Image: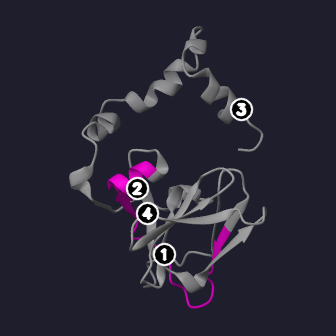
Amino acid sequence: MADRPIHPDLHGHCLCKSVEYTVTNHEEPFFIAPFDVVACHCDNCRRSAGAPFQVFLPNVPVARVQFREKVPGAYKTYSSSEEAERGFCGECGTTLSFRVKRLTSVSLTVCSMENPNDFVPRDEIFGIQRLRWIERLFSSGILNVWERWRHTPDRKLMNQQHVIADHSSSRT
């Protein structure tokens, strides 16, 4: 266990920072690297995130997670099935958690964490539901289009609203 570093408390928040959370890990450490992070390709995860998959840190004891609302009532839950619920910010819509209701653990979305690069997926679940174009996305260089595009004079033709509104914002 000495070669597996103990991770300090974990912190995260939604896009608008109306909901923040802390996972205590300094007393009786639970999180020891490498983490059992999973990428989920199920239809519910894709739809709730509006993305091709979601990445979670699963099995976090509920008792160690503290959600704080900067805007009263901002942390919401949605029953995505009879057995599961998803936690999200009611102000900006960021998905923060997934929980099977009968369990005493929760899965937290890695990309809502302060240091998402520390949590590399080691496994995937519901791979049978993976979108067919995912492999192409990661192997073809298509993800590098932003680097090519941002230096071109006709960049206004490409999703100007997203680039200016989100990536030039002082919030991020």
Q: Is residue 15 left or right of residue 36?
A: right
Q: Nearer the viewer, residue 129 or 85?
A: 85
Helix, strand or loop under label 1: strand
Residue at (42%, 32%) from the top-left corner?
Answer: 143
Q: Position of residue 27 (x, y in %)?
A: 62, 89
Q: Which mark is residue 106?
A: 1
Question: How far apart are the two marked residues, 1 and 4, measured between alpha carbons?
Answer: 14 Å
Q: How many marks?
A: 4
Q: Which residue is mark 2?
A: 45
Q: Is the C-beta separation of discs 3 and 2 under 8 Å?
A: no
The numbered mark, 3 or 4, whose residue comes first in the sequence reads 4
> Which of the two labelled residues, at mark 2 and mark 1, occupies the earlier sequence position?
2
The location of residue 98, given as percent across then percent down, is 47, 67
Residue at horizontal 46%, vertical 53%?
48
3D distance between C-alphas at marks 3 and 2: 28 Å
Q: Is residue 77 left or right of residue 129?
A: right
In this view, the mark in front (3 or 4):
4
Q: Mark 1 or mark 4, which is nearer to you?
A: 4
Hey, what amino acid is under mark 4?
A: Ser
Please give the label number shown on residue 80: 4
Category of crowding for the residue at label 1, using alpha-carbon neighbours closer than 10 angstroms: few (below 14), some (14–19), many (at least 20): many
Say what amino acid the circle numbered 2 marks: Cys
Sequence-wise, the earlier of marks 3 and 1 is 1
